[in-house]
Image (cartoon, rainbow, N blue to C red):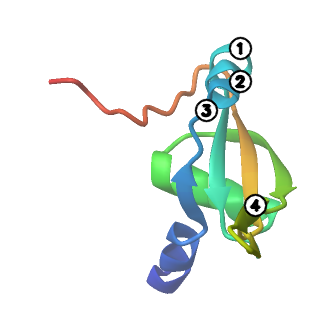
């Protein structure tokens, strides 16, 4: 894999999305949730997770999240739309976001 392609794949994943729902998904069905770039597709997300975390990915599901509408006194505003990906890993594979506690 050339250097430019690796850099593009590194930019696909923005951050892990850690919530109660994503923690339960990780424990029960070995799924991890990531915030990803809006233009990312399933194959790019799969390659990026495999490259960054050195794991085997079984499946990727994508959800487009609509930004909330909020009021700021008299004006109305809207948060950005964003995309999240549910990544299912192969049996025996895990991702440790916290790292070792040594």
* Badge 4 or badge 1: first in the primary sequence: 1
* Residue at the (75%, 42%) spot, across then down: 86
Element carrying mark 2: helix
* Badge 2 or badge 3: first in the primary sequence: 3
Local crowd size for mark 1, using a 10 Å CA cut-off: few (<14), some (14–19), many (≥20): few
Q: x and y percent of residue 63 in the render?
A: 85, 52
Q: Which residue is mark 1?
A: 28
Q: Which residue is mark 3?
A: 19
Write down the quadrant of residue 70 in the picture: bottom right
Q: Nearer the viewer, residue 39 or 93?
A: 39
Local crowd size for mark 3, using a 10 Å CA cut-off: few (<14), some (14–19), many (≥20): few
Q: Is residue 29 above or below residue 47?
A: above
The Cα atoms of the two marked residues, 2 and 3, are separated by 10 Å
Give yes or no for contact between labels 4 and 3 (Cβ–Cβ under 8 Å). Answer: no
Q: Closer to us: mark 3 or mark 1?
A: 3
The Cα atoms of the two marked residues, 3 and 1, are separated by 14 Å
What is the residue that sits farthest to the front in this orientation? 74
Q: Which residue is mark 4?
A: 83
* Residue at the (67%, 21%) spot, across then down: 91
* Residue at the (69%, 41%) spot, across then down: 57
């Amino acid at each position: 894999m050339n250097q430019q392609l690796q850099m593009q794949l590194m930019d696909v994943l923005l951050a892990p999305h850690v919530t109660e729902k994503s923690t339960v998904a990780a424990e029960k069905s070995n799924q991890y949730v990531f915030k990803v770039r809006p233009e990312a597709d399933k194959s790019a997300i799969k390659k990026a997770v495999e490259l960054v975390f050195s794991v085997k990915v079984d499946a990727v599901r994508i959800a487009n999240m609509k930004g909330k509408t909020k009021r700021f006194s008299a004006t109305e505003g809207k948060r950005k739309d964003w995309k999240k990906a549910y990544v299912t890993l192969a049996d025996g594979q895990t991702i440790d976001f916290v790292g070792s506690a040594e």
